[in-house]
Image (spheres, coloured by chain):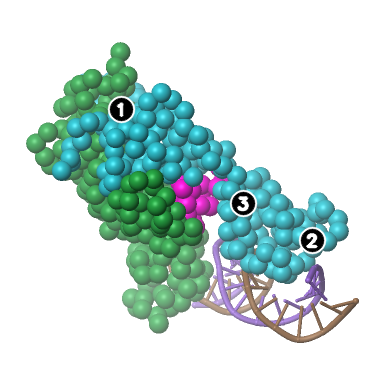
Chain colours: A green, B cyan, C purple, D brown
Amino acid sequence: MASGTRGALTRDAVLEAAAGLVRRHGPEALTMRGLAAELGTAVTSIYWHVGGREALLDALVERTMADLGEIRPSGATPGARVVSVAHTLRRRLREHPHLVALVHERGLTERMFLPAQQALVREAHAAGLRGARAAEFVRAVQFQVVGHVLVERNRERAPAQHPGEEELWGAGAAGDDPALARALAGPVDTERLFTTAVEALVRALLAPDGSDGA
Amino acid sequence: MASGTRGALTRDAVLEAAAGLVRRHGPEALTMRGLAAELGTAVTSIYWHVGGREALLDALVERTMADLGEIRPSGATPGARVVSVAHTLRRRLREHPHLVALVHERGLTERMFLPAQQALVREAHAAGLRGARAAEFVRAVQFQVVGHVLVERNRERAPAQHPGEEELWGAGAAGDDPALARALAGPVDTERLFTTAVEALVRALLAPDGSDGA
DNA sequence: ACCTGAACACCGTTCAAGT
DNA sequence: ACCTGAACACCGTTCAAGT
């Protein structure tokens, strides 16, 4: 069991082992005692190197968030580049399935978005938005992307829901629109939905005639 | 301490006491032993009436979700009515601060939105959308609203973030747009942001010329 | 049918003691 | 400086026993 690198225990070795545990079995499987067993050391050694469980999870989030890296927009128009930033962030977050929940529990969703924020500001300026309008645009995209990822992760974890949409839209409950009933009863194409929503939001907020101009 | 209604212990009395504990101190404060103490009964009696902790939380979510009630749209146009549905759902969820996290943990965010779904389908039809297009519209609004509430709740729980937007946008980091730097460094008007985002999404998706029409 | 105490198998954390 | 075992104060859950 003790897969720890023999020799002196280091803070990094503890974090590495903890990250592995979380990656393989989720955050709830990370117990101080289990981690110590995996490292072949005493529980209390972990406290010496990284502190308690909370500090350990903090360090883990920090470490994973750091290698999300910077985000390079691509596309011809500001709108297209904003959409590309959204897609990149979503993809990166999906590569670390447990991170999202961990970050959410810690109230760090805001920080999660920081690397993307500068890029979005540049695009907002390029699209002619400035000041408070630009800030609101950046925030709207941020809430949209992070919110979508949270909801998406959520429904992946709980595939069967009762009573769910299937039952609700099973019969001819949708008046005279069977195609709609079928669509709502079936699974969601979250990738497509994400694209649709982000594109719609960007289109509306970058339109020359915003609804709250003045 | 024992605030329990004297006499026979009922499933309802247990749920009532549990709901009070969660409302006052949050879900993590709900322990089987603490609840038993509050009820002036043995821990194991709770197991007889409602089952374990997981079943207890399930019942609590069920019960709170039930009194979210149906949603009546208001407004002159379909677009305005959709926005009103979004606002109503957001307001109701904010009245039960702990519910959102509880529902999220249980993977029930989808169910949370069911009462609003029928109303949205009606408005989609009224706006001329049908079939898959209408379904996608409903889903987009659903993800938007629930996602926003999740992010909003999250940042309320963790007001101080380091390094946060304040530091990032403190200096003249935003090129030549001090108004934007100030806006991004300051707090978020989530209510206004919610309105802006929902209105933008609805405007774009209900526009006669959608970007992905056939 | 309803309620009980005791016991089991876990937790995270602290602390005094070792080297 | 680093690591240890023992102990503390909790958990949720099960079970055999009571009435």
> Which quadrant of the view contains residue B168?
top left
Between the C-alphas of marks 2 and 3, the distance is 19 Å
Q: Against C3, is B185 above or below?
A: above
Between marks 3 and 1 in the image, the one whose residue lies nearer the viewer: 3
Q: Amino acid at mark 3?
A: Arg
Binning the other alpha carbons within 10 Å of mark 2 as few (below 14), some (14 to 19) or many (20 upward) gives: some
Q: Against B156, is B169 above or below?
A: above
Instruction: Give, as a single range, the part of the protein colored magenta.
Output: B97-114
Name, please, the residue furthest toward the front.
A176
Q: Amino acid at mark 2?
A: Leu
Residue that mark 3 sits on: B63
Residue that mark 2 sits on: B9
Between the C-alphas of marks 2 and 1, the distance is 55 Å
Residue that mark 1 sits on: A135
x%, y% of residue C4?
82, 71
Q: Residue at x 51, y 38 (%)?
A: B71
Q: Read off the chain for label 1.
A: A
Q: Main secondary structure of the magenta part?
A: helix
Q: Residue at x 56, y 43 (%)?
A: B68
